[in-house]
Amino acid sequence: MIDSKHIEFLKGIVGAENIYSDKAHLIAYSYDATRTRYEPDAVLFPRHEQDISDILKYCNKHKIVITPRGAGSGFTGGALPTNGGILLGMEKHMNQILEIDFQNMVAVVQPGVINMDLQRAVEEVGLFYPPDPASEEYCSVGGNVSENAGGMRAAKYGITKDYVMALRAVRPNGDIIRAGKRTIKDVAGYNIAGILIASEGTLAVITEITLKLLPKPKFTKAYMGIFPSVEDAMNAVFKSLAAGANPVAMEFLDSLVVQALKEKLGIELPESAGALLIGDVDGNVSDEVEFQLEILDKSFRENGAVEFIIADEGEDRDKLWYARRNASPSITIFGSKKLNEDISVPRSKLPEALTRIYEIGDRYGFKVPCFGHAGDGNIHVNVMVDGSSPQELEDGHKAIEEIFELVVDMGGTLSGEHGIGTSKAPFMSIAFNDEELSLFRDIKQAFDPNNILNPGKMGLPN
Amino acid sequence: MIDSKHIEFLKGIVGAENIYSDKAHLIAYSYDATRTRYEPDAVLFPRHEQDISDILKYCNKHKIVITPRGAGSGFTGGALPTNGGILLGMEKHMNQILEIDFQNMVAVVQPGVINMDLQRAVEEVGLFYPPDPASEEYCSVGGNVSENAGGMRAAKYGITKDYVMALRAVRPNGDIIRAGKRTIKDVAGYNIAGILIASEGTLAVITEITLKLLPKPKFTKAYMGIFPSVEDAMNAVFKSLAAGANPVAMEFLDSLVVQALKEKLGIELPESAGALLIGDVDGNVSDEVEFQLEILDKSFRENGAVEFIIADEGEDRDKLWYARRNASPSITIFGSKKLNEDISVPRSKLPEALTRIYEIGDRYGFKVPCFGHAGDGNIHVNVMVDGSSPQELEDGHKAIEEIFELVVDMGGTLSGEHGIGTSKAPFMSIAFNDEELSLFRDIKQAFDPNNILNPGKMGLPN
């Protein structure tokens, strides 16, 4: 717990205008996209890296807990101040695009920059930053790095970690660390940037991010494959990719989502549509786009597709993507509350994984509509329950646990892109053995011996 | 020092046929590509992961130092047993390609697999493993991961770390750790694979590597740009890339290398050739290849190229590449010993970096022929000295130190792809401040509290 003496000292660092300790603000900063609430004792808005260093040094000495926070849009509680203490907000001052280096195709940003603001800024100069989480309009790049966020374009372009060239960060003892370089190759010293990515703010506070950019591809088209069944669509995913397709995105909607889109939103889809694959292909030349579409068309039809639709950029493309974009809001017809997990399995295991996930749902009597980034094996699994029924909530969580056990057993992961945070922490022992969990604790201890940075996340000690 | 009691116990683990402690073998395993020699006390060839766990557990208890070794082809001493102890050889048993999973485009290999054997095996089924260090015919994939090896194709395809999906490894205490998954996305737990890559065998012994593969591109052509000066060529590098070119490779030969190729090997090159850029472009469709060549042609000419030559696959391509392949052996005309460093700077800094490196060489009276992977900013800088002159050797090392200071000052790195090992360890304090070096020590301590794994490398304590 922070007392007034601490508040005064911290005011001296950031200035009175950059600290909140009144109830209204503490409530306003108590939640993230998990909709669970934990009030911090104070919210601080550091003005620069040195502020962060000074704050951490002080808190480390007084064993005051700190939770870094980007936009608070995380799905697993990574930015929740579960132990109170200080919430370190990056949104107010640490939100600048510091540089777009066109010559080296690199952007340097502060952690509070909104993902889409970065995408737009680099596209203005003909460059391209691929990672596009669904929350791109409001999530922060610092949060993206801390959770190693993915997105639709991961099938071709990879995830956040594939774009981080360098970081600056502050250790809990106040030490300012530079990790990585503005060079494609750098093998001097331990890969500190590598371990900070996806560490959910538990090891250091990221203060600056250097990102690799790409040339913007010149041509894009969208496609939709209509399949009679989920199994057909899932087979088409890995078989088309193994046949050489390299689509930007390959998004999947299952039979329940198709049903929901028709019933709730009146979207017209063929009677025969039991599952959809929707995505984009791109290239520097139109022949590359056509090459990709030909492979997809052929592979999809060989795996049972009844239709393969192609759309140019613009309105036609938007129409194809409309179904995908409305998947999440449509499925509430199956239950007032969704227990949403973002599992990932090797792509060839998708057909079996989906079959067995539906079986688990059936056994509990829940609908489990699934959709997501099939092209990279990452599926959003939604166990739909009546949120007003404690029994259904309890059973829903049991179903989730069974799904995790299944996924890990099939060589998959608890989380493809959302992270562990608080919401998946109870399941860590399904995915990791004692030796692995012990290594995580040793690493945490090495960076943060007083356990002041975001304790209790990722199954680490509170 | 290992006594006979230790040897007997270790024999009991791996069998008498898998341990050497006789002088001849200790000498045979005392060196790597740095040509420096340190004899181990014993060479062990573990048969499998469990052997490695048993060996480490025993050595950890008795504080016996262990150096893991792939093919011993490293340029910076990473696999040298500088403190004696046990050399852990992966070449005899841990050298299998365990699986090529075509459906998920993944290969699973043991650390002793030779890089080129893997490349050939995956190409046979139409897949592609891009990392291609110059030593690809004899270096091991385990060594590649431990040093985060690069290669020619890094300009387009990145480096080893971009292909590592998962690792298995053994900690010094014998704990077997699985890190990562056979999935594109995995954000559960700390990125252990990320920190093991490039850690030079100082944190854990890697026992299995899961690698991402790509579809094999269908079309390739080679190109050569002939420039009047190094500065023109260096400008053409970053300007062509910023103009949207994405060549597989963009290799650079400077004026001295051009001179050496003519004088020593009689290679015919235009009188006007002051520097060369040589590389490949590839694509799934021939239009993509042509698109790339057009950008290069235009950008190269805008930056002073007097000629731009294109070659199809086969003999013509081999002819263009012949100059690049013979760069290293040709430059001995400038001195009997080369002090070879693989610096890397942001690409836009290449023109200035080269100018200033030559100035340093001039000041000491040394020729400094430079060549290498300009497309990713990684240049092999060769300070040529008379190896029989202690004075020249001493001055040569002073020149190298000045070059490192320059490179770091320009935002570059001590090593683009060779690692730190022993040979660059004295320069770590040029690149890293006390806080960063202290973090490296803390991480080392977390993994290996008894400091038994490859101590003294990377500037870490002996």
Image (cartoon, coloured by chain):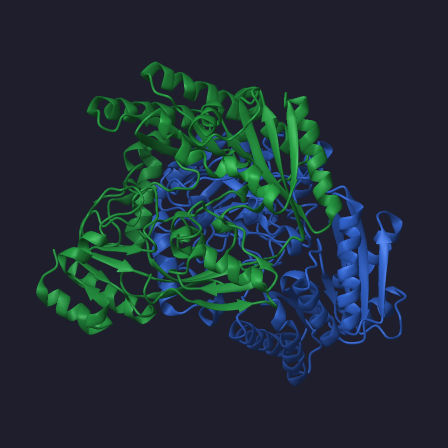
Chain colours: A blue, B green
Give the residue drawn at x 74%, y 43%: A284
Q: Position of residue A460 (x, y in %)?
A: 41, 59
Most foreground residue, B336 or A401: B336
Residue B8 visible, this angle:
yes
The outermost residue toward the front is B266
Q: Quadrant of residue A174?
A: top left
Q: Would you place residue A428 above or below residue B131 in this image?
A: below
Most foreground residue, A18 or B412: B412
Give the residue drawn at x 34%, y 29%: B430
Most foreground residue, A18 or A66: A66
The C terminus of chain B sits in image quarter? top left
Q: Would you place residue B460 above or below residue B182 in this image?
A: above
Q: Position of residue A202 (x, y in %)?
A: 44, 51
A450 on left or right of B308: left
Q: Quadrant of residue B432?
A: top left
Most foreground residue, B82 or B113: B113
The N terminus of chain B sits in image quarter? bottom left
Q: Position of residue B276 (x, y in %)?
A: 55, 28
